[in-house]
Amino acid sequence: MNKIKLKNSLANIINVAILSTNNTAYSETFIKAHKTLPFHIKFYYGGTLPSHLEGEGYLVKNRITNLINRLKYVFDKSLSTPELALKHSLAKNRIQLVLAEFGVTAADSLNVIKSLNIPLITHFHGADASEYKLLNAYRDKYLEVFSYAKKIVVVSRKMKSALIELGCPEDKLLLNTYGPHSSFFEIPKRLKKQQFVAIGRFVDKKAPYLLIMAFQKIVNKHPNTRLVFGGDGPLLNTCKNLVKIMGLQDNVSFLGVLKPHEVKALFTESIAFVQHSIVADNGDSEGTPVSILEAQAAALPVISTYHAGIPDVVIHKKTGLLCEEMDIEKMANNMLKLIENPELCRLYGKNAAIHIKENFSIEKHLSCLEEAIKKTIDE
């Protein structure tokens, strides 16, 4: 009887390959979560055409391997050596479905996936659906992806509209917003400092310099207020210099890349999460920032902008306060409103935790993706 059960359980195992551009980006917590899906996962990474397999290393190992691949797939004359290496690995591991993280990964790996006739689910995340130069370069390839993929996953209503405009059939689109790890709901609610917290990369679309400019107006009225940044990126030194010029060295701290327990500690002692997201000059936009979901799960109200997927998850005047992009005055006023109204701050935080738990848990996000994969395999 046990042998029969084991045989049946093995028969139900689905071999899924997750293809991603990299393996180490600290900000891409959603990809780490996808690796926990209840399938036999093989994780490929290293560029838009993945060159590595987790646990095994570089796919193109040596000249002999390359020769074997070329002899085995002698009829695949259109495929390059890196494509042949990926194809060989996918075939060897009997992959039944590919989940491509980012549209560009799906586009550059499509020849390999099609050559094996493997079903594809493509997961867009942010810049891959918004950056102008990228969209121009990949327009034709995206149309091929839209045609071949069984499902196209998006994380915000705005992203959904953008892909429809690019030519994606609406019936293939699956809106599946991220969710925070359940541990963020368990953070103790202590007496909080007069401190705002911002977690994220120092890049144009997060516009940390605009947040600093808004925060200066808070310090003018409440000189003991603090702003703490967690993260790294190309604009970090620029922001540090701006803080010096504005004389805010005693009020603003830059803590670098933080571990999850360090982020949770900051959430415990801060009064609100702040982020002034904008559409960058090159078109780069957010998907739905995971840090905003995590902050609300930790009962922090969010002060941010009407940008990308943020208004999908932050309810203005209920779980936080939003303003238009580039409106520094309004951003400052929203920060003042919460720092001067502790009861309102606590109410928004309480509402935020309930709102995220009911609508945007990581379990819900993963369950939706799991169902899409199973349905695709069944079909």
Image (tube, helix red, strand yellow):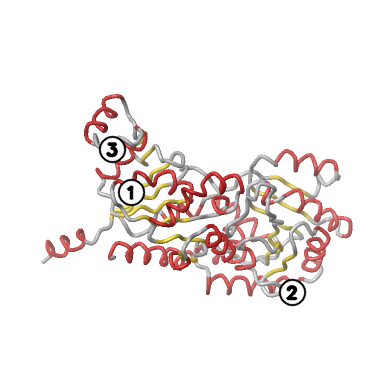
The residue lying at 46 percent from left, 60 percent from top is 153
In the rendered image, which residue does mark 2 sit on?
344
The residue lying at 52 percent from left, 68 percent from top is 360
Given the image, on which type of amino acid does mark 2 rest?
Answer: Leu
Q: Secondary structure at mark 1?
A: helix
Q: Which is nearer the N-term, disc 3 or disc 1?
A: 3
Quarter location, residue 99: bottom left
In the rendered image, which residue does mark 1 sit on?
114
Q: Residue furthest right?
A: 220
Direction from residue 364 to residue 200 in the image, left or right: right
Q: Which is nearer the N-term, disc 2 or disc 1?
A: 1
Q: Residues within 10 Å of mark 3 (few under 14, many from 20)?
A: some
Q: Which is nearer the N-term, disc 2 or disc 3?
A: 3
Quarter location, residue 350: bottom right
Which x, y percent locates residue 123? 46, 56
Which residue occupies the foreground of this view, 352 or 316? 316
Q: Secondary structure at mark 2?
A: helix
Which x, y percent locates residue 335? 78, 63
- As drawn, the label of residue 76 is 3
Quadrant in which the N terminus appears: bottom left
Which x, y percent locates residue 35? 40, 53
Label 2 with label 1: CB-CB less than 8 Å: no
Which x, y percent locates residue 364? 45, 68
